[in-house]
Image: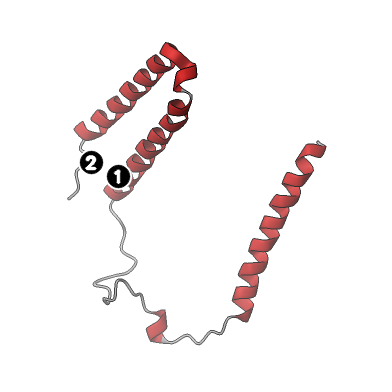
Amino acid sequence: MRAYIPLVLLAGFIVLNAVAIIASSHLLSPTRPTPVKSSPYESGMPPLGDTRERFSVKFYLIAMLFIVFDIETVFMIPWGVAFRQLGAFGLIEMIVFIVILLAGYVYAWKRGALEWE
């Protein structure tokens, strides 16, 4: 249990530091709100339409697919580092992993999840 004391102290310091920085920024920063400062601003252009517009479910689906496939490819980095120690078994495991990943990709593609309107 003593081995975790530095970790707990570090986590406590991080949380305390984050709270202190946010609180001091909120308390010490000058605020002079005006309607112009409070209006939404995007790429130097005034917004066209409602700023609270809902996004399509398609947007979130593509975002989740990107995250899933991105994280899956990150899993290949440790495999590449340890490839020589894993031998043929490691190669077969990665082939199975890639086949499952490609099956998910083909499924998403056939279902039209990657089409953008």
Identity of the residue furthest to the top in this view: 88
C-beta proximity under 8 Å, tags 2 and 1: yes
Label 1: few (<14), some or many (≥20) within 10 Å? some
Quadrant location of the N terminus? top right
Whether residue 91 is situated above or below residue 70 in the rendered picture:
above
The Cα atoms of the two marked residues, 2 and 1, are separated by: 6 Å
Residue hosting label 2: 114
> Which residue is painted at 17% across and 50% down in the image?
117
Element on which disc 2 rests = loop
Q: Percent position (x, y) of residue 86? A: 47, 17
Dividing the picture into quadrants, the one containing residue 35 is bottom left
Q: Nearer the viewer, residue 4 or 67?
A: 4
Q: Is residue 86 left or right of residue 12?
A: left
Amino acid beneath label 2: Leu
Q: Quadrant of residue 61?
A: top left
Percent coordinates x, y for residue 87 in the rendering:
44, 14
